[in-house]
Amino acid sequence: MGFWILLGFERVEAPAALGGRVTWLEREATQIHLIHTEGATVPVLGHAAVVVDGFEQTLERVGAAGHEIEETRKLWGARRAFAIAPGGHRVELMESPPPTGASRSVS
């Protein structure tokens, strides 16, 4: 959960009907639902992508907390990086959101 706090998310109450096996986090109407399981389940390429405020400062803060960070190629003229969250999950950190509609081509 601490990794997501570094990205500006805050813990919110999950529905009691879920039985306490989840942690919900929220930032600006975006939620991350962490489901607690016995074994790790990490997709090879699938990942969450989050637009972060203060891209450079966020990379510094996440790296200083001991998380692996790898900046990758720009898309749509914006910087991007991948961070490895606890449990080995890849999280894409984006400087700005992708454009919408026809301007979404990857160039």
Image (cartoon, rainbow, N blue to C red):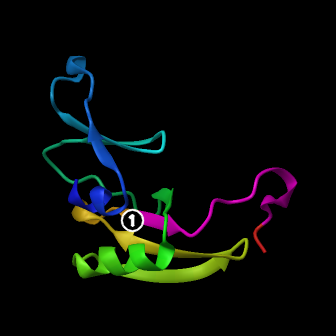
Asked whether, in this view, residue 40 is left or right of residue 100, the answer is: left
Q: Which residue ends up furthest to the right in the rendered image?
A: 102
Q: Position of residue 43 (x, y in %)?
A: 38, 57
Residue at coordinates 49% horizontally, 73% vertically from top-left?
55
Locate residue 66: give its quadrant. bottom left
| Magenta residue check for 94 | yes
Quadrant assignment for the C terminus: bottom right
Q: Which element type, helix, strand or loop, lies under badge 1?
A: strand
Residue 30, percent across and down?
47, 43
Whether 73 is among the magenta residues is no
| Kind of residue indicated by mark 1 | Arg
Horizontal side of 50 relative to 63 (left or right) equals right
Q: Nearer the viewer, residue 40 or 14?
A: 14
Residue at the (35%, 51%) spot, across then down:
9
12 in relation to 93, above or below = above
Question: In this rendering, would 40 be left or right of 26?
Answer: left
> Which residue shows up at 47% across the image and 80% down it?
56
Q: Position of residue 79 (x, y in %)?
A: 59, 77
Instruction: Determine the image quadrant of residue 61.
Output: bottom left
Q: Residues within 10 Å of mark 1 (few under 14, many from 20)?
A: many
The magenta-colored residue range is 91-105
**What residue is drawn where x is 62% and y is 65%?**
96
Residue at mark 1: 90
